[in-house]
Amino acid sequence: MKISVPVNHNFYEEAPIRESALGEAFSVRKKGIEKLKEIFSSLYDLKVGSEKLNQIKILSFKRNHPFEVDEERLILKLYCKERPDQDKEYFVQTGLYAGVLFYKGCKINITTKYGDSFLKRMLNFVNDIYVDNEQIKAQKDKTENQFLFIIAYLFIQSLEKAAVLGLPQLYKKHQEKGYKVRGRIDFTAYLNRDIPFQGKLSTTFRERKYVQEVVDVLFLALRKLERLFGKEIHARLLGLSQLLKQHYSGIFSSYETIQRAKKHQSINNPLYAGFKKVLEYAEIILMDNDLLPDDDNKQLATTGYLFDIAELFELYMEKLLSRNLPDWQVSSQVDLPIYQRQFFARSIFPDIVLEHKITGKVVVFDAKFKKMELLNRDVDRNDLHQIHSYAGYYRSQLSAIGLLYPLSREIDTQVAYSKTIYGINDNEINFMIDGILVHENQSMNELIKSEEEFVGRITSLLNAN
């Protein structure tokens, strides 16, 4: 049984599902409908920090999260409401985490709702790993294909960094009988086996060897990505791929092999600590569909993996602006300390800050991975207040502020741009709503054109100030 729903869905409860239409909405039969009702009736609420996340892998594109400790971030909420003289209404709400969850035999796909081109393009910009090759094999499940792109990116990025100091190795003790002395002579073996002396001596020595479980898991993960996406997917790891192939045992890694690799003592060595994350990604790649529990399994634990898509979009916008605005220094998640001498001291973190390299003028953007059809309700009140709070911090340095979105409609600067903040004429600080026009069936060329148009609008605005 599967439920598929996009990120940032149904915030205003605008898409209720009537009880009579529950089976049609999720393409399930009568038996599945009863199970769905049970899940919805239990008020399934999954948020960041919840104990339900213990068996869920949350994969990040950044090292640090500047969120407040007590900040609640919705992942998924399933619930129902009674309506007088009507069917029950069932609701699915999602936040900004995409991925795959398994709960009570139900597979829940939280999709990005945009096409593969946009996801690939964001990944390309984040780390210059190009996975948008036209020869990539099509997958039966496009939703999972999206997630595999993300996992492939994270796996390759982390493996490239971790392997700088080499693959995990351990010293192993070896015994050898020969004409040359290697290491030290094994006198016990000499007395027991080498008398009368025949010219050969038994010696014992220690030799560094690659950890076989780790080699096997990494090699098979790369091979699987190669089958799915073509050899270009790991072009930057060609030398490492050849080394793994050379030392591969030839035995397919089972679940137990993967667990032994993840728990191997060599990974505790600070030199190889980076392989902890690498092996987590490799496990997802190799296990793939095996993550789904058996339908007869009655455990209540939720398993699966999730990605912070908002974080990916933010990094994409930062890189896009950085590469196209050479006169500006572009930074992300800048720490702005406020009230440092008071008991309520804290920091605020604008997503993207542009500072002109000569004049010192500042432009601040917040990137929001939310629906934007240029309707009033699409601009969240908290987001609007948040971006304006940065204006007060930078004051005279500030040239412009704005919110950036994946746009569902072409932007009209006449209604989306204001020459002053708050729309009042006592300042010359620009405010705008803008972003990249994206849609589900968009080609890569169309997306690139949309990027160029966006950069052109921002460049014109900056040059005018």
Image (tube, grey):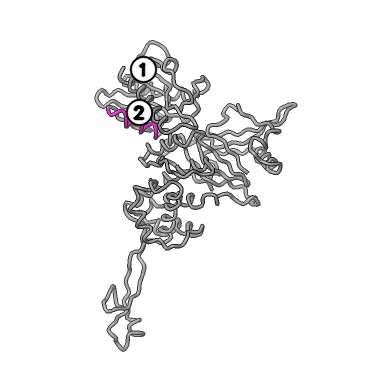
Quadrant including the N terminus: top right
Residue 47: name its quadrant: top right
Which of 157/393 is in front? 157
Q: Is residue 273 left or right of residue 373?
A: left
Q: Which mark is residue 206?
A: none
Q: CA distance from mark 2 to mark 1?
A: 15 Å
Q: Residue at x 69, y 40 (%)?
A: 33
Q: Earlier in the sequence, mark 2 or mark 1?
A: 2
The residue at 30%/30% (across/down) is 329
Mark 1 — residue?
429
Q: Regarding mark 2 in the picture, which secondary structure is present there? A: strand
Residue at image mark 2: 353
Query: Would you call the spot at circle 2 few (<14 residues within 10 Å), some (14-19), or many (20 or more)?
Result: many
State the image quarter where residue 335 is shown: top left
Q: Which residues are magenta?
A: 315-326
Q: Is residue 406 magenta?
A: no
Residue 220 left/right relative to 240: right
